[in-house]
Image (cartoon, grey):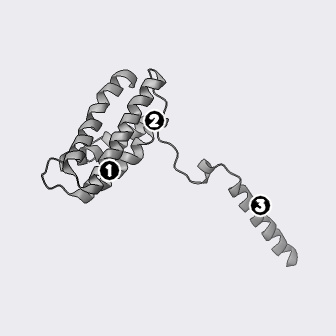
C-alpha cells in the first residue's frame, strides 16, 4: 500500500511539473488571432460589433451599455492588429494604420464609458474610415 501511495505521489508531481514547464501559450492563454479572424470578429455580418455600434449611434439617446460592451470587444481585438504581419505591403505602413485603428478603438471605448455621443460618433467614423486605406495597401488581392 505504501508503494502505491508513493507511486501515485511521484506521478502527480511529474504531471504538475510537466504542466508548469509548458510555455504560457500552451497553458490556456488566448493565442493571438490572425488579421482575418480579427476582421471577421469585428466587421463581418449585421451583428458585428462595429455594425452594432454604428447602428446604436444613429439614435440621439443610444443604449450606452450595449455600445460600451461592443466597444470593449473592438478595443480588445483592435489591440491585436499591430502585432500581426500584413499579408502584403510594408510592415511600417501596416503598423502605422493598425495603431491608428487601435487608438480609435480605445477612443470609442472611452467615449462610451463617458456616454459622450459626439466623441463616440467621431471615433466610430474614424474607425470606419481607417479600413479602406489599410485594405488598399495591405489586403491580399
Q: Quadrant of the C terminus?
A: top left
Q: Secondary structure at mark 2?
A: helix
Disc on res. 47 = none
> In terms of sequence position, does the residue under pointer 2 or pointer 1 come before the other?
2
Determine crowd level at label 1: few under 14, some 14-19, many 20+ residues with C-alpha closer than 10 A.
Answer: many
Secondary structure under tag 3 reads helix
Farthest residue in the bottom direction?
1
Q: Tag 1 or tag 3, which sits nearer the N-term?
A: 3
Q: Residue at x 51, y 49 (%)?
A: 30
Give the quadrant of residue 132. top left
Residue on which disc 1 sits: 109
Asked if residue 9 is positioned above or below residue 90 in the image, the reply reads below
Give x and y (percent) for residue 16.
72, 62
Residue underneath mark 2: 82
The picture quadrant where one finds residue 124 is top left
List x then y, in percent, for residue 2.
Answer: 86, 78
State which mark lies toward you, 3 or 1.
1
Residue at disc 1, secondary structure: helix
> Where does label 3 land, which residue?
14
Say left or right for 37 vs 130: right
What's the residue at 46%, 37% (across, down)? 34
Residue at point 49% right, 30% down?
A: 85
Classed neighbour count for the residue bearing mark 2: other residues with Cα under 10 Å, few (<14), some (14–19), many (≥20):
many
Residues marked 3 and 2 touching at CB (< 8 Å):
no
**In whole angstroms, how far apart are the C-alphas of marks 2 and 1?**
18 Å
Q: Position of residue 7 (x, y in %)?
A: 83, 69
Residue farthest toward the left in the current orientation of the protein: 60
Amino acid at each position: 500500500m505504501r508503494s502505491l501511495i508513493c507511486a501515485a505521489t511521484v506521478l502527480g508531481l511529474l504531471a504538475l511539473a510537466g504542466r508548469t514547464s509548458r510555455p504560457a501559450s500552451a497553458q490556456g492563454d488566448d493565442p493571438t488571432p490572425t488579421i482575418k479572424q480579427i476582421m471577421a470578429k469585428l466587421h463581418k455580418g449585421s451583428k458585428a460589433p462595429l455594425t452594432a455600434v454604428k447602428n446604436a449611434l444613429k439614435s440621439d439617446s443610444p443604449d450606452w451599455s450595449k455600445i460600451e460592451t461592443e466597444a470593449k470587444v473592438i478595443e480588445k481585438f483592435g489591440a491585436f492588429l499591430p502585432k500581426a504581419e500584413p499579408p502584403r505591403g510594408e510592415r511600417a505602413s501596416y503598423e502605422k494604420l493598425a495603431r491608428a485603428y487601435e487608438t480609435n478603438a480605445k477612443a470609442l471605448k472611452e467615449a462610451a464609458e463617458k456616454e459622450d455621443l459626439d466623441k463616440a460618433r467621431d471615433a466610430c467614423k474614424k474607425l470606419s474610415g481607417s479600413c479602406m486605406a489599410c485594405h488598399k495597401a495591405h489586403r491580399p488581392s
